[in-house]
Amino acid sequence: QVQLVESGGGSVQSGGSLRLSCAVSAGSYSRLSLGWFRQSPGKEREGLAAIEKDGLTTYANSAKGRFTISQDSTKSTLFLQMSSLTLEDTAKYFCAAGYGYLGSSWSRESEYSYWGQGTQVTVSS
């Protein structure tokens, strides 16, 4: 069983930065591929970034250059560093985990078996 708990969300002004964390409880963290998603009211959940079990990272166009996914394997924690935030980044952010290799399907929700409850990020002008 894998449990994910996000933290680090909050309110920030446009242009600001936030770092989200996802604490992962799993029997074998090193076997997991991990991703960050977000969802705004009335919109579909959007994949932002993923990190494969071998450390390979990939990003959505909306995240490239502004967001960085990383992990501390020793602490079984996943991070999403976000900068240059805009009003459009307001959403609930989720981390997700799966035991498969994500590849080009990294942004599909179905590739992940485990999800956190999410943390809210609100960007104001």
Image: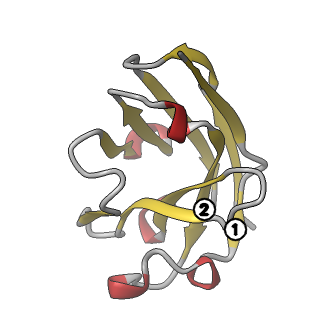
Write the residue at 36% across / 54% down. Answer: 62
Q: Is residue 106 above or below residue 62?
A: below
Visible residue check, residue 28: no
- Sooner in the amino-acid sequence: mark 1 or mark 2: 2
Q: Position of residue 71 (x, y in %)?
A: 37, 44
Which mark, residue 34? Answer: none
Q: Residue, x 63% and y 84% (percent of image)?
A: 110
Instruction: List the residue tagged with mark 1.
Output: 114
**Does residue 61 sit above or below 8 in this rendering?**
below
User: Quick one: SS at disc 1?
Assistant: strand
Relative to 40, is 105 on the left or the right? Answer: left
Identity, as a three-letter code, of the amino acid under mark 2? Ala
Q: Is residue 71 visible?
A: yes
Q: Position of residue 15 (x, y in %)?
A: 37, 19
Q: Is residue 14 left or right of residue 98?
A: left
Residue drawn at x 55%, y 64% is: 46
| Tag 1: amino acid | Tyr
